[in-house]
Amino acid sequence: MWAFTIRKLIYNIPVYLATVMIMMMLLRVQDPVAGKLSKNPTQEEYDATKKELGLDKPFLQQYGLVLYEVATWRFHRNMWTEPGVTVGDKLRTAVPRSLALTIPALMLTTVISIVIAMISAFNRGRWLDRTLVFFAVLGMSISFLVYIIFGQYFGAFLLPRWLGTDVFAIYGYESPLKDWRNWPYFMLLPVLISVIVSMGYDTRFYRAVMVDETQREYITTARAKGASQTKIMFVHMLRNAMIPIVTRVMITLPFMVTGSILLEKFFGIPGMGYVLLNAIDNSDFPVIEGFTAIFAGLFILSIIATDILYAVFDPRVRLQ
């Protein structure tokens, strides 16, 4: 397994290097210095700003600096929009806020969707299956923004009026590592919205997987041996369906760190998605380069981890 992991890492190094280089080249299609200055800057202002931003150095040297920051995990360049604040400082504060939102949402969505999918698969064609599929399709068909707007309206406006007290907040969760006791007040509403939105997609996917598994011979054998429905669902079928489940979960892992841009924007959560969106709006190149380089690395690592987990959950898979 270690030999396979090291080999996969070596194979993906050129992919990662090319990804970072293409990203940096695309960011420099338009002159970033001109976008930061006024409409008619003097040559002295232009040269001074270019030197201040480190863009006066050769491209390969700038490319090496970004790679060095990723390798050492020291993002020491200052943000353009917040002088005196480094990209590393912003990362250390933004990542926990995103994880406080995405980890509970992913865990709840996965567990609930798998259970609903198994129930639907074992009742295929019946009224219960049709009802669950109807609500899954309905959840997929409604825009994410609609859920956010209605969630804020009912959860942060109507519900407090009915109960006479605030239940949810619609503004930022600043320090999840210190004030974790306030997590339900700040984060429960966006987590519930995220779960409701994602359940439609996940339920449809897992249902297709479970329907295919119910037609396998081992399910017929388990029923013939007198195994209970619960044991068939949660022991036999779930274990054999782990390959597609692991694939779907691992694909979403990089997005856990980057956070949900829409939820963080509308709920004022200063996480990775919120910071990255503001950086794009303000052409904050150090932030965009640092965050994108991290995301590319996480995505590659998640793919490698997926291959390894295949062998862990399915003995028939061999890492060669």
Image: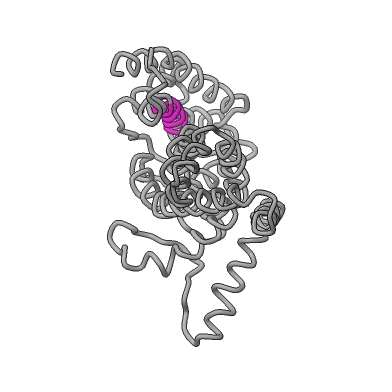
Give the image location of residue 25, x and y in percent: 55, 21
Q: Residue at x 31, y 32 (%)?
A: 73
Q: Is residue 101 magenta?
A: no
Quadrant of the frame with the N terminus: top left
- Asked whether, in this view, residue 73 is left or right of residue 103, the answer is left
Quadrant of the frame with the C terminus: top left
Question: Vertical placement of 119 versus 32: above or below?
Answer: below
Question: Vertical placement of 299 versus 264: above or below?
Answer: above
The residues colored magenta run: 293-306
Classify residue 91 by image quadrant: top left
- Asked whether, in this view, residue 146 is left or right of residue 185, the answer is right
Q: Is residue 5 among the parts visible in the rendering?
A: yes
Q: Residue at x 41, y 50 (%)?
A: 103
Give the image location of residue 227, x and y in percent: 44, 47
How would you classify the magenta stretch by its main secondary structure? helix
Give the image location of residue 215, x and y in percent: 59, 36
